[in-house]
Amino acid sequence: TQLLEQSPQFLSIQEGENLTVYCNSSSVFSSLQWYRQEPGEGPVLLVTVVTGGEVKKLKRLTFQFGDARKDSSLHITAAQPGDTGLYLCAGGGLNTDKLIFGTGTRLQVFP
Amino acid sequence: NAGVTQTPKFRILKIGQSMTLQCTQDMNHNYMYWYRQDPGMGLKLIYYSVGAGITDKGEVPNGYNVSRSTTEDFPLRLELAAPSQTSVYFCASSYGAPRTEAFFGQGTRLTVV
């Protein structure tokens, strides 16, 4: 069974602060995705990483895939209230067509 | 520009009743998924399909059934509803393997009383 554990589960910060969210597993994944979900909506894709050690940037968001492809991180620089939401990592297994989601990190950014 | 459409948006069921959650996509995607999301948590995979006529179990399939007779439709059947099935259900589709973007419907909020 492939599990994706995210930490922290909750994060409440002031506008302008930096933060990092982690996504860890004991299994190897062929790819890792990060989604953001707003209340009452389905998740929306932010980024996909497929190569061990890969780093991708999306404005103030930086995503990294671990060298062993078992973990990933999301770093937000100078958080804004618009970053508030539920952040979910999701992984595609090596020999499976399943897309498994992590436990989620709820971020609240206060003005 | 519909994408993934789920119906109904809300439903209240009594214990022991059955219902079908509908999901249809107009993007000609091969892969379709059903997830459930409990309050404040991540998504748990119930069933998935890689094409018409092919379905497979996810992490939490007990109490559910699916079928995939067409590329567009992927209904989820609940037999003998139980309070533990109270959740928000999301259907998603993607073009290919899990590394491609998954597009989600708006969700169905189900309460079993």
Image (cartoon, coloured by chain):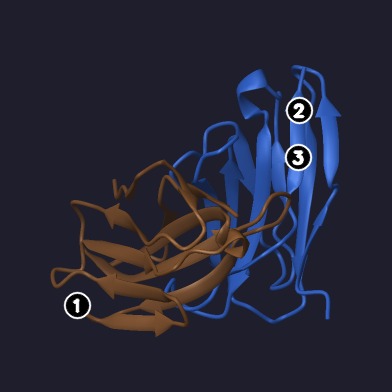
Chain colours: A brown, B blue
Q: Of B8 and A9, which appears nearest the observer?
A: A9
Looking at the image, which residue is at 75% across and 34% down? B110
Looking at the image, which residue is at 49% across and 52% down? A14
- Report which residue position mark 2 lands on: B111
**Badge 2: few (under 14), some or many (20 or more) residues near its Cα, within 10 Å?**
some
- Report which residue position mark 1 lands on: A52
Kindly indicate whether the residues beneath marks 2 and 3 are on one polypeptide chain. Answer: yes
Q: CA distance from mark 1 to mark 3?
A: 37 Å
Kindly indicate whether the residues beneath marks 1 and 3 are on one polypeptide chain. Answer: no
Image quadrant containing the C terminus of chain B: top right
Q: Secondary structure at mark 3?
A: strand
Q: Please, which chain is the residue tagged with disc 2 on?
A: B
Q: Is residue A69 above or below residue B44?
A: below
- Report which residue position mark 3 lands on: B109
Q: Amino acid at mark 1?
A: Gly
Name the side, left or right, on which A97 lies relative to A22.
right
Question: Looking at the picture, how far across and down is residue A107, in whole percent?
Answer: 50, 50
Q: Of the numbered discs in the image, which one, if any, rests on residue A109?
A: none
Looking at the image, which residue is at 86% across and 47% down? B8
Image quadrant containing the N terminus of chain B: bottom right
Q: Secondary structure at mark 1?
A: loop
Q: Of A9 and A18, which appears nearest the observer?
A: A18
Q: Amino acid at mark 3?
A: Arg
Q: Is residue B54 at all visible to an observer of this figure?
A: no
Q: Please, which chain is the residue tagged with disc 1 on?
A: A
Looking at the image, which residue is at 84% across and 40% down? B10
Circles 2 and 3 in contact, beta carbons < 8 Å: yes
